Image: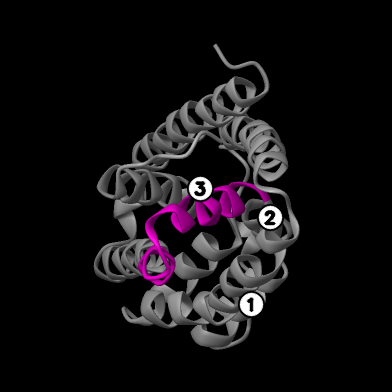
Amino acid sequence: MEPITDFYLFMLSVIFISLSGVMTPGPLLAITIEKASKSKISGVLIAFGHGIIEFPLMFLIYFGFTQLLAPEVAQVGVGLIGGLIMVYLGIQTVKTRNKPIQEYKNSKHGSLTAGVLATGANPYFIIWWLTIGTALIMNSKLFGYVSFPVFAVVHWLCDFAWYTLVAMVVFKSQQFWTKRVYDAITLFCFAILVGFGAWFIFSALRVIYPY
């Protein structure tokens, strides 16, 4: 991925890419909707449960995985693979948009524990961080040591804001979650994933074939 050298532009890309990941329908969203029918703070607890897994993984990638790779090799590899995965996830988001979300509603645990388990058991979460997330972490290094903690917090705050919002809305009115809302979220995720995926791929190719 071609690095973004403007910090504020980078953080804007972090917000949009993070939201495209967190808003994509999946186990955490389904559990949030299920738990929200009983408690409006379920989204907060699920987000904290998610963070229990996510923060250590982010730091592991920052201090371990990215240190083992040559910068240019990592830039090309992560850019190409991450870009392809983003495009794939965007297409899958549209193809599986009618998949019953009830399939994921099988948690009998509390919201915090459910957030931990749903995150740890989701293979797409690990794949996302080893490709797309790694590319973002590599880019954060351009802005010094402070930028990574800022990146990590901003990314998690996207999770926190989304799950908190969903839980509060569902708690107040479960009828709000209509097909039209669902389709709008799906379209947003598709556009962001495919758009940034194409940019990842193009940027990686420019490293291989500069002009």
Quarter occupied by the N terminus: top right
Three-letter amino acid code at disc 1?
A: Ser
Helix, strand, or loop for circle 2?
A: helix
Q: Who comes first in sequence, dot 3 or dot 1?
A: 3
**Badge 1: few (under 14), some or many (20 or more) residues near its Cα, within 10 Å?**
some
What range is drawn magenta here? 131-153
Q: Residue at x 44, y 53 (%)?
A: 142
Helix, strand, or loop for circle 1?
A: loop
Q: In this rendering, would 9 be left or right of 75?
A: left
Three-letter amino acid code at disc 2?
A: Leu
**Badge 3: few (under 14), some or many (20 or more) residues near its Cα, within 10 Å?**
many
Q: In this rendering, would 91 be left or right of 161?
A: right
The image quadrant that residue 62 belongs to is bottom right
Magenta-colored segment: predominant secondary structure: helix
Q: In the figure, 161 relative to 91: above or below?
A: below
For residue 24, which numbered disc appears in the image? 3
- Residue beneath disc 2: 130
Number of numbered discs visible in the structure rendering: 3
Say whether residue 149 is magenta. yes
Q: Distance from label 2 to label 1 (Cα)?
A: 26 Å
Q: Who comes first in sequence, dot 2 or dot 1?
A: 1
Helix, strand, or loop for circle 3?
A: loop
The image quadrant that residue 6 belongs to is top left
Q: In the figure, 83 relative to 58: above or below?
A: above
- Residue beneath disc 1: 107
